Amino acid sequence: MLSLMTEPTESRKQRAARRAGEFPPAPEPLPRPVLDSHTHLDITVSEAGVPGGPADDPVAAAVAVAAEVGVDRLVQVGVDVASSRWGVETAEAYPAVVATVALHPNEAPRLADLDEALRQIEALAARDRVRGIGETGMDFFRTGDEGRVAQEESFRAHIAIAKRYGKPLVIHDRDAHADVLRILDDEGAPETVVLHCFSGDAEFAAECVRRGYLLSFAGTVTFGSAGALREAAALTPLDQILVETDAPYLTPMPHRGRPNASYLIPVTVRSLAGTTGADLDELCTAISATGDRVFGPW
């Protein structure tokens, strides 16, 4: 006992480092089931594993853990040809999962043959379990302005694919609000547009709402610095709200910095209920109905 008492205790920094790779504890289940409108199961499993530890079937395990807290449907999102193909195969194997397919805007400038990659994405888009085209859009954070031409070409091509197949367009927009709206106006937006991980302020949200777009809120809405994002959420009608993880990224508070997964959706939903003033049951019902309308039926 003495030796245990005299050992140095973990510092706050050491404890944070140790826990960085651990999934947070499961939250209280939601009163009504909802979906995770944007997740990357392939990246989550390969980089962070599965909540609860290794599993023979990690996708089935991730789906089951999410279902236990009321997240019974997942939208697996593609970022390149390989992940899009994996997503389609996964959606065809697991009834709780549907897929979207696309080239992420950061991917487009890297490709030696963008046209061929787009042809492969379009071939996948025809599959029944593919319920959206995305994530596509504009993001110059990593590519700089030199990536602009390829990103815009890719974005315009994805808009055309979404319209040809009558499927929702899922947009990645990082500090490119004006460019995204300009290109949508140039090309003519598909019937259904989802702003993934919505990151705009109240003014941009109001414009998206006016256009009939769907705003999908991630764990970022729980961050202390996200006051402008909460203002945007507060003015968004409940029937234009979706909720996502973007797992394994953007883990909601108080677990920021640890791996994210679909089972943590209830944390963000409860935060949104407080932000919007909506009754939790009412918000869950609205999110579920919107998810079925946009991506369903499962």
Image (spheres, grey):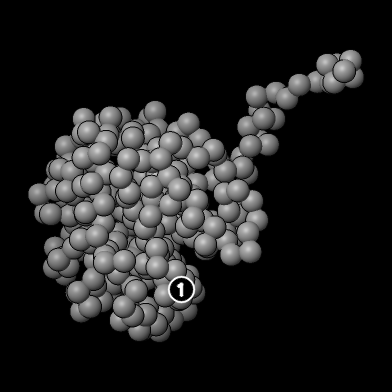
Above or below, 20 against 150 in this view is above
Residue located farthest toward the right when viewing the structure as drawn: 3
Image position of 41 (left or right of 171)? right
Residue located farthest toward the left when viewing the structure as drawn: 210
Above or below, 221 against 249 in this view is above
Quadrant position of residue 233: top left
Residue 98 seen in the current view: yes
Residue name at image x 37 percent, y 67 percent: 98
Q: Which residue is mark 1?
A: 93
Instruction: Please state, as top left, top right, bottom left or bottom right, where the C terminus lies in the image.
Output: bottom left
Q: Amino acid at mark 1?
A: Ala
Residue name at image x 39 percent, y 63 percent: 96
* Residue 115: x %, y % from top left: 37, 82
Image position of 217 (left or right of 80)? left
Q: How dense is the environment of label 1, judged by Cα within 10 Å: few (below 14), some, or many (20 and up)?
A: some
Of residue 154 and residue 64, the one placed in the foreground of this image is: 64
* Residue 24: x %, y % from top left: 55, 39
Image position of 78 (left or right of 158)? right
Residue name at image x 26 percent, y 67 percent: 297
- Label 1's element? helix
* Residue 7: x %, y % from top left: 84, 21
* Residue 235: x %, y % from top left: 16, 37
Instruction: Please state, as top left, top right, bottom left or bottom right, where the N terminus lies in the image.
Output: top right
Of residue 4 and residue 230, the one placed in the foreground of this image is: 4
Of residue 4 and residue 194, the one placed in the foreground of this image is: 4
Residue 81 seen in the current view: no
Quadrant position of residue 258: top right
Above or below, 108 against 3 in this view is below
Residue name at image x 22 percent, y 33 percent: 279
Number of marks in the rendered image: 1
Image position of 25 (left or right of 230)? right
